[in-house]
Image: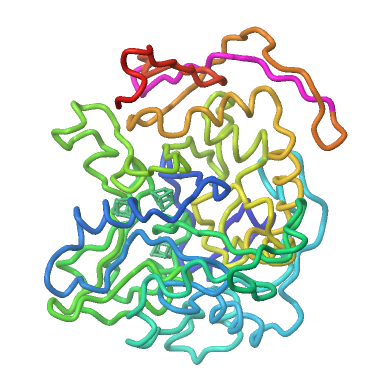
Amino acid sequence: MPTVKNWQLGRDMAYLYDAQFPSRQFAFVFNINRCIACQSCTMACKSTWTFSKGQEHMWWANVETKPYGGYPKWWDAKILEKLEEANPGGQVWGGKASDGRVGPYGTFEGQTIFEAAQRTLTPDSARVLGYLPTDEEWNSPNIYEDNPVGKRGVRNKLDETGEQLPVHNTWFFYLARICNHCSYPACLAACPRKAIYKRPEDGIVLLDQAECRGYRKCVEACPYKKSMYRGNTRTSEKCIACFPRVEGTDPETGGEPMETRCMSACIGQIRMQGLVKVAEDGSWAEDRQNPLYFLVHVAKVALPLYPQFGTQPNGYYIPPRWVARPYLRQMFGPGVDRAIENCANPSRELLAVLQLFRRSNRIIYRYEIQEGPKVYEGSLRGRKVELYNDTVIAFGKTGREIFRTTVEEPIHVRSNAHANSI
Ligand code: SF4
Ligand code: SF4
Ligand code: SF4
């Protein structure tokens, strides 16, 4: 197998094809601390792309309650278990976190799904370590919603101690997921028909229905289980990243790149999607004023989902602050502690950039901050805190301003005449 560079793992790794990178890459950041599991994202995708006969079980966008929920059921526990069986005790991170854009979480010393396949599978199926979920595992997209880890509550009685940060004893959180449009897609590597391809202009991974013969190798290989089989057409389908919107060819967009349906519908304002510049080695090219670049590489608050699988996913998550750290480290790698620390004590710039989420459905290419007055001074958990009402300005592809907003949300007081109206 050829060798490619995986910046998230801080090392080279085996992949079926030589590396080829798009000029820009579809990427997104989800702030888990804000998700309320309203499923507006889920339904926005469903009602746009997967409402037809044969697509009943297709939830390209889904939101599951961790740790017990998952769609299909147990998808992550199952692939983690397979990797552990292939490399017992060896799925660990080492080395030092780098300050640069390669190896920011240290070095992954274990086996990816591509490397473990070479060790454990028979030659004709040796491309990717995976499994095919059962029909039963695909039938409950929202099972275990709101089921926490920890002690059981007593009906009609308040908890005597409650919970305190930094870590709650009783916890769950909502994990919103779509296809990660990976830089090294496992679905693409596994397809014997070469029906799956990655677009050079935006890194979106698409599945050509005319070429697909329904072997389900992509369904088996995708560690995130985001390629799905459709029985009545005997082909597989997957998230298309709402590419007409991202391209600006959808009539709705007026020619300007627009965020996807699931991003635009997000009530909790947890989602931001963009197109990041890619360097020659596949890492992100420096683009200091791009908000996604800032969140991933400067503030270092957003982390890839299960980077150890090795697909270099392009979905990033700001981890939930109240959750047991070993669980989060398994899910997002060793960058978790730094991400939570930086998020709990945000810099002036981070506080401003967090205001950019969901003020518009246009893709933000660049932001600027205009400094505003100090509006608060105090202390929080023993630290001095100062808040400034800065203005953050978002610019689109052509350099035109899309919107501006402030750190402090404006307060509107109703007049007495309208005090009881909406
Ligand atoms: S998440 Fe799965 S389906 Fe999507 S690009 Fe990656 S491997 Fe393919
Ligand atoms: S990007 Fe578009 S196709 Fe993909 S999950 Fe979101 S709404 Fe569905
Ligand atoms: S729309 Fe946003 S807040 Fe609601 S479930 Fe989806 S990601 Fe969470």
User: Relative to 40, does residue 225 appear above or below in the rendering?
Assistant: below
Q: Is residue 106 left or right of residue 415?
A: right
Task: Residue 24: say if magenta.
Answer: no
| Residue found at the far bottom of this picture | 122
Q: Which residue lies at the image location 83% right of the left edge and 25% below the top edge? A: 384
| Residue found at the far right of this picture | 382
Which of the image's four quarters has the C terminus? Answer: top left
Q: Is residue 5 left or right of residue 290?
A: right
Residue in the foreground of this view, choosing between 29 and 234: 29
- Image spot of residue 88 (x, y percent): 72, 85
Q: Which residue lies at the image location 60% right of the left edge and 55% below the top edge? A: 5
Where is residue 141, by image quadrant?
A: bottom left
- Image spot of residue 169 (x, y percent): 73, 65
Residue in the foreground of this view, choosing between 255 and 269: 269
- Image spot of residue 234 (x, y percent): 17, 79
Q: Is residue 122 left or right of residue 26?
A: right
- Image spot of residue 55 (x, y percent): 20, 71
Q: Which residue lies at the image location 32% right of the left edge and 59% below the top edge? A: 197
- The majority secondary structure of the magenta stretch comes to strand
Residue 100 visible at all:
no
Residue in the foreground of this view, choosing between 399 and 160: 160
Q: Which residue lies at the image location 32% right of the left edge and 76% below the top edge? A: 192
User: Relative to 189, does residue 417 appear above or below in the rendering?
Assistant: above
User: Relative to 300, does residue 138 appear above or below in the rendering?
Assistant: below
* Segment tinted magenta in the rendering: 384-398
Where is residue 408, by image quadrant?
A: top right
Where is residue 379, by image quadrant?
A: top right
